[in-house]
Amino acid sequence: MESRWTHIGRLWTNGEPYLAADFGIRHLWLGSTEDEYFDRIVDLGPEEISIPLGGEAAAIVGGDGVVRDDSWMEVFESVDGIIAIVQASGADYRQVVGDALEFAEAPAEAHAFINTPSGQLAIFSAACDGAGEQAMMLLPPHTGHMPVEHGPPSRDSDTGLRLPAGSARYRVEAWSYTKLGDSGCFARWLLIPQ
């Protein structure tokens, strides 16, 4: 896991999914102030992996309530620029996350595409606005070791990520609740440079 994937951040969810979108259009998402989270996200099924945002699309990533309700989602980048968001549950957390990263079966869900003409990718909670007073702070990637255990939420405010885009276009693939034998389960979202 360590040789191919680099851990670049953690995102906390209270059950809500996150959105991955071009940084330049994030301000168009009004999940909190205009109730877009309730109007456009809450009733979506796992097969829905993107929504229109302005003239572009935002990917719906993270927050699989079958894996865990309140949960960390681990964010990785591969040596070839793929962004992986993994939500996992199991007795050996680190092992389940590693197995989820290497899981090779095709996803059951459809795929979607998002464009990143600004050269930056924003990943933030769909329950918040994309920018402004009701938005979460977006942090740059911070490389480090994958946590050994899931652990409790941070006492600090929840944050999203602001990443340099490795491509002007990403293919998004999603695996909703996926069982790993008796060892655990995961959900995984891949943003693959095109």
Image (cartoon, rainbow, N blue to C red):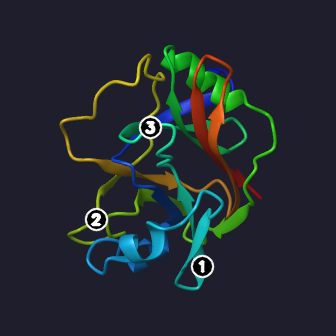
Q: What residue would you read off at disc 1?
A: 56
Q: Is residue 84 above or below residue 36?
A: above
Question: In the image, 44: left or right of 152?
Answer: right
Residue 122 showing in the rendered view: no
Local packing at callout 1 (Cα closer than 10 Å; few below 14, some 14-19, many 20+) is some
Alpha carbons under labels 1 and 3: distance apart: 30 Å
Q: Quadrant of residue 77?
A: top right
Q: What residue would you read off at disc 3?
A: 68
Residue 156 is situated, as x and y percent measured from the top left of the image, at 19, 40
- Of mark 1 and mark 2, the one earlier in the sequence is 1
Quadrant of image for the N terminus: top right
What amino acid is at disc 3?
Arg
Q: Are marks 2 and 3 in contact (CB under 8 Å)?
A: no
What amino acid is at disc 1?
Glu
Mark number, residue 98: none
Could you tell me which secondary element the residue under label 3 belongs to?
Answer: loop
Residue 142 is situated, as x and y percent measured from the top left of the image, at 42, 36
Could you tell me which secondary element the residue under label 2 belongs to?
Answer: loop
Mark number, residue 135: 2
Residue 78 showing in the rendered view: yes
